[in-house]
Amino acid sequence: MTVTPEQSVDAANAVFGRHLLTRAAHMQGDPIAATVRVSNGGGNPNVPDYQPDVRHPTALITLPAGLPALKPVASYATCTYYGTHAFRFVDADGGSRYVRYTFVPDGIELSDDPILQFRHQAYTESVRRRMEG
């Protein structure tokens, strides 16, 4: 069965409703420049571009001068991660519960060394020190 893009959008609108406006922060105000590319979703570099495959859009957005931007995190070890999938856990009595993971950093200490903070291996070094200590 082949589904066209129009049929896909129509199906989503039938389920969630048709929304002409959005409140998403990045969709407010004047248009801004963006470079968008679509890449193959798999990791196999030998898959030809014409073969049906999962595709993923990526956008590089150019913010106008003066527009606030998010600052990068000091370390990924300081970020809270929220799972996108739920997993079914079954206990010894056969009872079950669906669980979605949330990983919250605990006791993360970042180096005061400015060279280490910006080195490519800063995260690896941070994890290594925590494992040793």
Image (tube, helix red, strand yellow):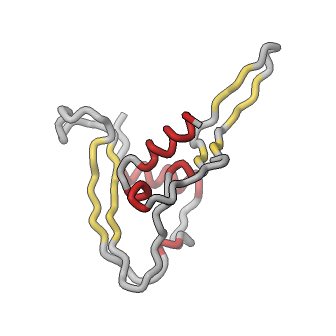
21 with respect to 33 (left or right): right
Residue 33 to residue 128: above or below = below
- Quarter in which the C terminus is drawn: top right
- Quarter in which the N terminus is drawn: top left
Quarter occupied by residue 86? top right
How many marks do you count on the picture?
A: 0
Q: Nearer the viewer, residue 86 or 132?
A: 132
Q: Position of residue 47 (x, y in %)?
A: 20, 33
Residue positioned 47% across, 79% down in the render: 68
Q: Position of residue 69 (x, y in %)?
A: 45, 74
104 with respect to 96 (left or right): left
Residue 34 to residue 109: above or below = below
Residue positioned 45% across, 44% down in the render: 125
Q: Nearer the viewer, residue 8 or 86?
A: 86
Q: Nearer the viewer, residue 69 or 32?
A: 69
Q: Nearer the viewer, residue 65 or 30?
A: 65
44 with respect to 2 (left or right): left
Residue 45 to residue 28: above or below = above
Q: Position of residue 36 (x, y in %)?
A: 29, 61
Q: Position of residue 93 (x, y in %)?
A: 82, 14
